[in-house]
């Protein structure tokens, strides 16, 4: 099934080998717009396609298309190097055994995770590659502005509130109390605590 | 050790750990605590172009950058960094920019949109690094390009697809392309015998059919001053001849013609012709320059070739300029003109093709930036002109006609920065010092007057602060503070750079204001060393930086001591011969407090050693220091060996020399891929805690030797070996073989060391435990005195010669991205944990906390209670790229060569500087700003709470008084 998939996904172009030079292939793809990145031309001046950690690099055109030249057959890691957007990493397998002498080879690309085993069972992506941004980097921590709720939830403000309540409200409560009840409460407060009877 | 299972969960756990300390940058801090400078490098090709009414200056630089600059402001409109590629041709036309480059085994042609900088197409062809390459627009409006790449003449069209290709053969080094008359011509200098000459291959532009190939201009070479390609013509002068011969490309009969011109006869005498030189003026245009000396003066004439109706070639003078000591250039983009800029004072004169005369002046500091070496004339959108000049020191200037000052200037010297040293600055003056500075010396005689003046100065400072507070800024703007004045927190320092263009320049770390710049030599400045730090009293000796530069013209080394605050040269010595291989600051000082520096030249025997300054006093001081504490250094003097040496003095005690101490030979089949890590700072290994407290309260003691160095070797059998050596004894402390790793220009080996931790990163073709995955792997190795808790070396004195073998704990992680440099943050007392800063190729500076890189993170199981108490989280292979930890935030810090961290006066805060193509400075607080108010602390809340308390007291006071009075009467 996998071989069938690979066979169906044929590379569109391959650079012919010249003399003893190692056979080099050309890989095509495009950055496609999505909700995260709605204007791919923003990437054109700042992002690059990087294969195998810098072995091959390609700039991105204003329509998001890219072409990576000089790839050799085998497994490669393709990344989009951008300082502003996150992109998925791709495992690209160029199979020379599909080269029927016409300069073409089969290409199978799959999403991979950093540090994880490349899983051949993962779905093969269509070719030419269509890669979409997964996130736009948010570099900043929003600063909390002035909030009246936050201010009154401040422990200091709660202490102030309790003090004010003690100063303003308690005298009024005292004034409204029955004098006898007040006297009893005062006596209860001022009376020394009775020791608990020993068992 | 990389494990792929359960990545998501453990990755989230790691992110949670990272987020604990990741306070992130507040939006209003961006640009306030950091600064960034985007640079392009020193241009070697310039072209002006106006498209859709917008004029721009396009530049190809020695840093492999193609950039578009605004012609009126010099700001960068767009730029592309062609990392590792050397740019050859730069052509602009029809709203497109063509850049031909080579590198990495390929010749490339790229066409960009001139306005937006977006790539239109690219073409690459396998080529050897020595193969010449060239490219030109076809010029028919199609945007197609004819190029020589990989030994073939190729026409490339939209999409980067070759329309046709013609193999050129190896008879000549074809480095020139001309498109004319429906044909494409590849022109090259003949190889082998035959006395030189040019070989021309003519191909049909439509289908690439070979039309003709022939030789012309026997014995001539392009660039020799006697032969040029001017449009569709090849022009040359035979040795001893006073006439030119001209060949129209493709012409068969006659193959060449003699070119006589009345203008030449008027301009110069026959004997002047014999010493004249020809130069190319505008690529693709039928123009060239003739430079000759007449009556002791040098003159340059711009000449245009034209063809008469009979097919004969004629010529006319476009402009003539005296060019004594001047750089000459031309107007690109069809604006045929000639400009000469005086190398001495920046005065420029230009002649337009229409005969108009322009002049102006580009005033600049020649001592700081060197003479003008390159010039160009750029037409603006309104039809005006701009003179552009590039100095040897890397300053790009642009001026308008009639103006005495430059319209704008870009200092690109620091795009070629080779080294940097941070110099502490004196604190700002106190009120008393300000009063003393501002007062009349006569008034200072009275103590009362001094007292009054001091209070007056303080009052003025308070008033200025209050006024600033009302305006919204309590602190004075950084721009208002002199670049050589520090602050109370140690945030302001001087970053002294050495550059590849021979310039030493000092910038303030807060804001980047330039304090001074000076050009020391016509070669690169290899090292900058702080030889004397800033002293607390102004009367003390000034801080000194020592710069070691190459004098390319004199084949000598210039060693200069500069006043760190003014840039004044205090002492300069020129040492004949090549530059030293190592410049080593020594832990010894001369009598004046200036640190001694060893200059080391490597030879097959013991290295030659010189002490700087070259005085008997300095040599004696070094010998005394070496007698007290042995001094060692190491050199990697060939591909397979690292040698260590001990500085030794003779019996007379004043002739230091290097004695071999040890040699570390790489195993057979290995070659050095990355030399021993740079070492000139003991503080990098200093630690506040000698051990690591484990969850059960036992301690693992750190191996805190300042002599650990890391090197990498390429294995013939494949893979990379990494060695940790002790540079005193040469003993191997630890080694690791990464069988599937690769190191090279595209996959750099980067490493950093801090305390007992070594962090390095390298590319793996097969990731261990995750095969067949590929990617960069970050390896962390922690060195301990023993792997047994509480066990340590009990000897009272430590010696590098007999230290015990360390116990090493390692872990590998999937790197957050390709890194070009690593560095650990550094604070004043080393209490704050150290982040590791990764300079990623994407242009991000990522700071990762120490817990994430901990090799003791438990693998495959959640941490036990003891491990949790130790602060360990479960191991996860990926090191996350948390955007809140990207120090450079929205800035793309391109091609970082080195990251440096320095302490401030606040223990919580470290400075981080990155330089390469761009410059970036910021402050970091790896453990949070524990000794400062939190950035999120609301001063408004504090003020409101205080006011509310005060109001409550004021309101309650009369009531309490009444109650007390009433109770007294009750």
Image: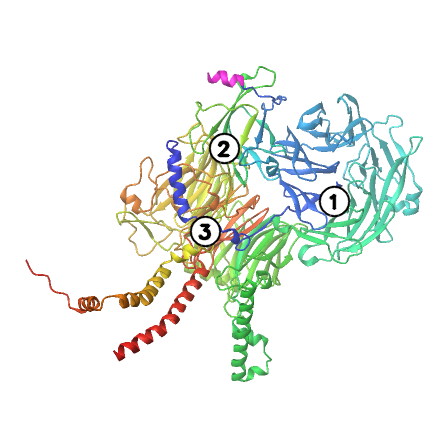
**Residue at the spot of label 3:** B825
- Using the image, determine if residue B360 lies above or below residue B70: below
The answer for which chain carries disc 2 is A
Looking at the image, how many numbered discs can be counted on the residues?
3
Render colour scheme = rainbow
The answer for which chain carries disc 1 is B
| Residue interval drawn in magenta | A1-8
Report if residue B669 is visible in the image: no
- State the residue in front, B61 or B539: B61
Which mark is on residue B55? 1
Q: Residues within 10 Å of mark 1 (few under 14, many from 20)?
A: many
- State the residue in front, B755 or B647: B755
- Using the image, determine if residue B161 lies above or below residue B616: above
- Using the image, determine if residue B612 lies above or below residue B713: below
The answer to whether tags 3 and 1 share a subunit is yes
Report if residue B898 is visible in the image: yes
Give residue B190's position: percent from left, percent from top. Answer: 75, 30
The alpha-carbon separation of the residues under discs 3 and 1 comes to: 44 Å
Give the label, 3 or 1, closer to the camera: 1
SS at mark 2?
loop
- Nearest to N terminus: mark 3 or mark 1: 1
**Residue at the spot of label 2:** A88
Q: Quadrant of residue B237?
A: top right
- State the residue in front, B848 or B733: B848
């Amino acid at each position: 099934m996998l071989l069938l998939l690979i066979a169906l996904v044929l590379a569109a172009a391959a650079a012919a080998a010249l003399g003893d030079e190692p056979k080099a292939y050309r890989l095509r793809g495009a950055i496609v717009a999505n909700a995260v990145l709605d204007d791919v031309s923003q990437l054109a001046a700042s992002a690059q396609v990087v294969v195998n950690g810098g072995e091959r690099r390609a700039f991105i055109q204003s329509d998001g298309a890219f072409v990576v030249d000089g790839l050799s057959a085998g497994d490669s890691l393709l990344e989009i190097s951008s300082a502003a957007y996150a992109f998925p990493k791709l495992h690209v397998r160029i199979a020379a055994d599909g080269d029927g002498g016409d300069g073409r080879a089969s290409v199978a690309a799959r999403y991979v995770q950093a540090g994880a085993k490349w899983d051949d069972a993962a779905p093969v992506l269509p070719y030419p590659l269509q890669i979409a941004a997964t996130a736009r980097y948010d570099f900043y921590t929003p600063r909390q502005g002035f909030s009246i709720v936050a201010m009154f939830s401040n422990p200091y403000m709660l202490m102030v509130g309790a003090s004010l309540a003690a100063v303003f409200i308690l005298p009024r409560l005292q004034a409204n109390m029955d004098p006898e009840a007040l006297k009893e409460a005062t006596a209860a407060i001022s009376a020394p605590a009775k020791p608990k009877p020993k068992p | 050790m990389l494990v792929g299972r359960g990545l998501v969960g453990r990755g989230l756990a790691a992110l949670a750990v990272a987020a604990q300390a990741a306070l992130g940058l507040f939006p209003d801090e961006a640009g306030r605590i950091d600064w960034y400078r985007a640079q392009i490098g020193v241009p070697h090709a310039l072209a002006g172009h106006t498209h859709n009414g917008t004029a721009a200056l396009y530049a190809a630089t020695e840093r492999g950058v193609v950039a578009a600059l605004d012609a009126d402001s010099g700001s960068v409109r767009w730029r592309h960094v062609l990392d590792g590629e050397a740019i050859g041709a730069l052509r602009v036309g029809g709203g497109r920019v063509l850049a031909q480059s080579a590198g990495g085994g390929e010749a490339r042609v790229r066409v960009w949109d001139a306005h937006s900088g977006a790539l239109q197409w690219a073409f690459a062809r396998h080529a050897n690094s020595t193969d010449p390459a060239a490219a030109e627009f076809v010029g028919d409006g199609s945007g197609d390009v004819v190029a020589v790449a990989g030994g073939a003449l190729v026409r490339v069209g939209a999409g980067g697809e070759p329309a046709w290709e013609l193999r050129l053969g190896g008879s000549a080094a074809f480095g020139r392309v001309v498109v004319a008359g429906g044909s494409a011509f590849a022109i090259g200098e003949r190889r082998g015998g035959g006395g030189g000459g040019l070989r021309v291959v003519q191909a049909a532009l439509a289908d690439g059919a070979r039309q003709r190939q022939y030789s012309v201009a026997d014995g001539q070479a392009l660039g020799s001053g006697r032969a040029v390609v001017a449009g569709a013509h090849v022009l040359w002068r035979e040795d001893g001849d006073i006439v030119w011969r001209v060949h129209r490309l493709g012409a068969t009969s006659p193959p060449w013609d003699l070119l006589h011109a009345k203008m030449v006869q008027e301009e110069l005498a026959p004997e002047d012709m014999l010493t004249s030189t020809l130069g190319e003026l505008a690529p693709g245009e039928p123009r060239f320059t003739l430079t000759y000396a007449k009556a002791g003066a040098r003159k340059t004439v711009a000449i245009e070739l034209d063809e008469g109706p009979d097919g004969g070639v004629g010529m006319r003078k476009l402009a003539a300029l005296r060019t004594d000591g001047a750089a000459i250039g031309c107007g690109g983009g069809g604006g045929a003109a000639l400009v000469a800029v005086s190398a001495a004072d920046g005065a420029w004169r230009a002649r337009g093709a229409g005969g108009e005369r322009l002049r102006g002046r580009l005033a600049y500091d020649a001592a700081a930036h060197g003479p003008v070496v390159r010039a160009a004339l750029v037409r603006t959108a309104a039809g005006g002109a701009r003179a552009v000049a590039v100095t040897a020191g890397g300053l790009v200037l642009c001026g308008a006609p009639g103006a005495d000052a430059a319209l704008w200037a870009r200092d690109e010297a620091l795009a070629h920065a080779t080294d940097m040293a941070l110099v502490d600055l004196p604190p700002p003056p106190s009120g008393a010092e300000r009063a003393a500075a501002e007062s009349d010396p006569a008034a200072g005689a009275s103590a009362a007057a001094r007292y009054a003046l001091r209070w007056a100065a303080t009052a003025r400072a308070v008033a200025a602060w209050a006024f600033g507070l009302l305006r919204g800024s309590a602190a004075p703007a950084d721009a208002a503070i002199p670049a050589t004045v520090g602050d109370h927190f140690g945030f302001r320092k001087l970053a002294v750079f050495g550059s590849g263009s021979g310039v030493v320049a000092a910038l303030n770390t807060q804001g980047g204001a330039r304090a001074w710049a000076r050009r020391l030599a016509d070669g690169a400045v290899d090292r900058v060393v702080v030889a004397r730090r800033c002293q607390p009293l102004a009367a003390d000796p000034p801080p000194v930086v020592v710069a070691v530069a190459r004098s390319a013209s004199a084949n000598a080394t210039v060693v200069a001591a500069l006043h760190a605050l003014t840039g004044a040269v205090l002492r300069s010595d020129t040492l004949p011969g090549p530059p030293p291989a190592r410049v080593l600051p020594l832990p010894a000082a001369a009598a004046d407090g200036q640190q001694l520096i060893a200059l080391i030249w490597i030879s097959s025997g013991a290295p030659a050693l010189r002490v700087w300054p070259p005085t008997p006093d300095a040599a004696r001081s070094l010998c005394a220091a070496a007698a007290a504490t042995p001094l060692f250094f190491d050199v990697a003097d060939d591909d397979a060996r690292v040698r260590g040496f001990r500085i030794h003095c003779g019996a007379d005690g004043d002739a230091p020399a290097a004695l071999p101490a040890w040699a570390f030979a790489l195993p057979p089949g290995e070659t050095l891929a990355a030399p021993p890590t740079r070492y000139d700072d003991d503080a990098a290994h200093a630690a506040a805690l000698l051990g690591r407290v484990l969850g059960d309260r036992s301690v693992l003691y750190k191996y805190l030797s300042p002599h650990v160095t890391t090197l990498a070797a390429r294995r013939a059998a494949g893979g990379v070996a990494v060695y940790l050596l002790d540079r005193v004894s040469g003993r191997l402390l630890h080694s690791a073989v990464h069988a599937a790793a690769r190191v090279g220009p595209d996959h750099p080996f980067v490493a950093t060391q801090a305390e007992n931790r070594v962090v390095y990163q390298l590319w793996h073709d097969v990731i261990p435990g995750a095969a067949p995955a590929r990617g960069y792997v970050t390896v962390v190795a922690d060195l301990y005195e023993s792997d047994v808790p509480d066990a340590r070396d009990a000897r009272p004195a430590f010696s590098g010669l007999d230290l015990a073998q360390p116990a090493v704990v390692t872990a590998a992680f999937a790197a957050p991205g390709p890194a070009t440099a690593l560095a650990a943050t550094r604070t004043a007392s080393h209490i704050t944990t150290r982040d590791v800063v990764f300079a990623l190729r994407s242009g991000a500076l990522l700071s990762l906390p120490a817990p994430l890189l901990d090799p003791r993170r438990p693998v495959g199981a959640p941490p036990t209670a003891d491990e949790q108490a130790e602060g360990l989280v479960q191991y996860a292979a990926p090191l996350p790229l948390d955007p809140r930890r990207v120090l450079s935030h929205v800035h793309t810090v391109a091609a970082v060569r080195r990251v440096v961290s320095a302490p401030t006066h606040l223990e919580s805060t470290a400075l981080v500087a990155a330089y390469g193509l761009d410059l970036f400075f910021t402050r970091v607080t790896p453990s949070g700003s524990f000794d400062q108010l939190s950035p999120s602390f609301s001063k408004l809340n504090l003020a409101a709470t205080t006011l509310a308390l005060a109001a409550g007291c004021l309101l309650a006071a009369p009531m309490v008084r009444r109650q007390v009075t009433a109770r007294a009467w009750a």
